[in-house]
Image (cartoon, rainbow, N blue to C red):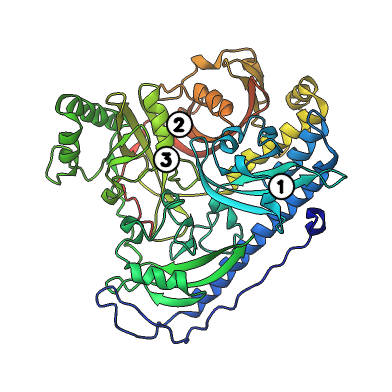
Amino acid sequence: MNRRGWLFFTVVILFAVCAAGYGMLVILPASNSVDEPVNVAPELNANLTDFHHSFLSQTTRIRTALLTTADALSGVEQGDPRLDVILRDLYLSVPASAGVCYVQDTGVVGRSAPLASLYSLVSRSELKDINADSFVNRSVLFVGPIYSPAYGEVVCFAAPIYDSANTYKGYACIALWPGELISDTSFPGSRSYNDTTYRPWIVFTDGLVLSSPSTTYVGDNVLDSATIRRGVSESVIRQILDEKEGAIRLSASSGRIAVWTTAEVDGREMRLILSTAELRSDIPLEPVNRYSTDVHNATANLYLYASEHGQEQTLAELANPQGIFASEKLRYFAYDFNGTSLYDGFNPQYAGENMLNFRDSYGLRPVATERFRAWQGGGYTYMYAPVQSGEPGLAVLCILYVLPVDDTWFVVVSQSILDHTVKIDPSKRNVVLSTVHNASSYILIHGKEAAFQEFMNPDSSLLADHRNLFAMNYNGTILMDVLNPEMVGADAFYFTDMHGASTMREIAMLGRAGGGYCYLGVTNSTTQESMICLVYVEPQGDDWCLGSSIMLETIPLDGWQQVEDLMPQVM
């Protein structure tokens, strides 16, 4: 069937969720033989319905946008300027995407948005093997999760492109982080509304994890990993994977239960699982006057110990609850340069797990950033650690210091900055993202120089919603800065944040790698306050990028506080 005939033919089937009083088998890990009905609260079933609807709505929206793009590309050849415009329109229509691209029938990326994104993802994964036969009787392919060093675990949708003679010309592709497949803010497990009562999972029927409360597990198989199951028996997991819907008690000791239903996307069946977890007690906030040098000194001491005693003895000492590194206030970590956890002061069971895809409350990958810092020789970085007790959407703002021990592993120490938790505002991600996307579209239409002139015009309404926008080439030269026009022409590589870290160099390297988010610490010279900012960067060509930042927290320069860190259990 011609793919164009499928363009707007999308079928969404909402599966019925079993009622609260439905009699389901209960498998208790202790005996695996006790049958009891599970008492499911009506609101849990209601939220499963929301979860299911959210997932299907988002995948339908993405597929429809992709099919529209593939249809528009049917008469566009490589080198045609319309190619950039069409891909940019798709990218802007799904702002949470990692990138979009046009892949030629040879398997080579012909063009992408942002520029230079997804090239390595396509060339090093099963995406390069997609051809005309892949789309027989299928309008869209759903591929993944696929691991990429640049993006972590992503999923991809691909739609074929045909010319007017119905000859296959290649395909259009969009890549997303799996968590973006849950978009509805009314659902209490989605990333934009971090309710701590519910834990959403999406697992294929073979056990492959598509989405989980901890992005660390995406791409792993729940049947093969006791770490993922966390005490839930394999027989319980298999019952969930074998039956299309139901309710079950996950653990006899904790009393946690789960409900699940089934969804299918482009021929791939998966289980949408919603579980309740025991709530932890409220975080005891115990402010102690400590300056950020404490975390630096602790890391330096750990580095000296590791250099003298070696990795094995160091890890044993870190694990010793009465050892020299035992602390109620600091958390210690060790990783190899592949991102594998050697020791985790929050969750020791993570040892042996690759943590590069773990995300904090603002969706950033702290371990990937720490590895980058280690490559640079060490330094400070930040993390918003999610809190899974009390009011939804809370996080602990942490400062971390990183030092490489040698060329195979590095160590990290973390401490909390404030004497209180902070409320996460996911809309700030969208503010900087939209600012850069809108500016990029304007540049594409009007040209770089004319766009810069318009951006810098204080009377322009183009950036009325958020005026923090800058451009920098990959040599570190500021090309445009709306809020600080006097900085145009300056070499930003000489700029450091309040802890001496060359964050502007990181921004340039982030742009060169395809773009993304990072944190920036700055000091207000007038108020003497420290500010933690969220920055979004996107490449605009082979040698420069656009960026926008927004303030997240304000901290008095002499008021850094230490509180007891509590990294939540993610299951």
Q: Is residue 149 left or right of residue 409?
A: right
Residue 469 screen position, x and y as percent: 65, 29
**Sequence-wise, which precedes: disc 1 or disc 2?**
1
Amino acid type, label 1: Ala
For the residue pair 553 and 353, the one nearer the viewer reads as 353
Residue drawn at point x = 48 percent, y = 75 percent:
243
Lateral position of residue 513 relative to residue 388, left or right: right
Q: Which mark is residue 530?
A: 2
Q: Position of residue 15 (x, y in %)?
A: 60, 75
Residue at left offset 31%, top offset 58%: 226
**Which mark, by number, is residue 356?**
3
* Circle 3 Cα neighbour tier, 10 Å, few/some/many (<14 / 14–19 / ≥20): many
Characterize the local packing of mark 2: few (<14), some (14-19) or many (20 or more) Cα atoms within 10 angstroms: many
Closer to the eye: label 3 or 2: 3
- Label 3, secondary structure: give it: loop
Residue annotated with mark 1: 132
Amino acid on which disc 2 is placed = Ser
